[in-house]
Amino acid sequence: MKRGFLGLIVFAAFAVGAFSGAAADRVPNAEIESISGEAWLVSASGRIKLQAQEDAGRIVYSGESLACVGNARVFGYLGAVSATDDKPRNLCNTPLTAETPSTNDKGRDAKSIALALDTYGKRAGRDKGSGSPIYAPSNGGAVLPENFIVRWRTRPPLNTFTAVLQDSSGAELASVPGADGASGVLDSDKLRKALTQYRATTTGDRAVHLIFRFETGPEQSVSFTVLSEQQEQDLDKALQGVAAASGLILYIERAAIFESFRMYGSVAAEYDAALEHAPESRDLLRAAVDAYSRIGDLHRSHELWNRLQQVEDLQ
């Protein structure tokens, strides 16, 4: 095993352990969208001055409070909002305790915010990903047939292989020979059609095994499930339910929804999209590192880890 790859494996184990356990025993009470003026985060361990860039997207946990100086403003969302809230409120001088979840006048279910902050704040949705180089589909996750694209790590590089889909009994659904192991991606209509047909003709858990079969050497594989048509409709409904949101909370809510459907690659993608708007957010970077480490995309996870270190070194 090459040193660089071994280093990524060690890094991934550390990152998942560090972030998964860091906030697991704390309750997320609020999420910060923006900061202007002098504001401080106060906890039993002391005071931290909030920074506009680095603390956008920050979670405020139970036992923490905000101290705002003069005309400072810290806008964000509580874990549950009142019936009139559809935009971030000024959290300065606001009790950061859970309210009774409700549905606002635009029909947005406030429980989705509470769930989103809990998922985002704890960043510990499932066990660490498998040792397979395949990270899309993620092992133990779920997919939609029409979006199915295979991705894998290319360090160390893989030889040419045949990609095989099997059902839970081991019967072959489809295969694609001659896949280039160095490319890192297999975008195949044949595989998508096979999964679409499998979903249409199968009840139950719709379990699938994806196997990389080489001429020599051991196979690589992951197992996943295909969302049913009803589950896809439920997913679409849930995503539509948060469509009125804007700012960072939109991506945080969408990530929580994808998490609930075990679409772990989409969880990582949502945090990545949020980072386009707040590239120096410490909490978003931590969440993204954790999400990419868990699916096994160690290259992207390591890139984000380096960005996080640069942000924290500036403090």
Image (cartoon, helix red, strand yellow):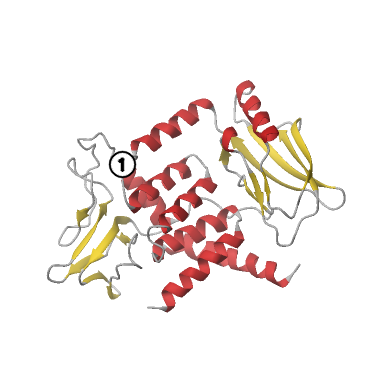
Q: Nearer the viewer, residue 59 or 313?
A: 313
The picture places residue 168, in percent across and down from the top left corner, at 70, 33
Residue 222 falls left or right of residue 287: right
The picture places residue 115, in percent across and down from the top left corner, at 36, 46
Residue 120 falls left or right of residue 72: right
Secondary element at tag 1: helix
Q: Quadrant of residue 128?
A: bottom right
Can you say whether 49 is above or below 171 in the image? below
Tell me the residue at 64%/21% (across/down): 201
Check the image and name the residue furthest to the right: 216
The picture places residue 85, in percent across and down from the top left corner, at 20, 45
Tell me the residue at 35%/53% (across/down): 248
Label 1: how many Cα within 10 Å (few below 14, some 14–19, many 20+): some
Q: Nearer the viewer, residue 258 or 73?
A: 73
Can you say whether 241 is above or below 71 in the image? above
Tell me the residue at 39%/31% (across/down): 237
Q: Quadrant of the N terminus?
A: bottom right
Find disc 1 in the rendering and name its residue: 111
Q: Quadrant of residue 4?
A: bottom right
The picture places residue 34, in percent across and down from the top left corner, at 27, 61
Q: Quadrant of residue 143?
A: top right
Can you say whether 218 is above or below 300 in the image? above
Type of residue at label 1?
Lys
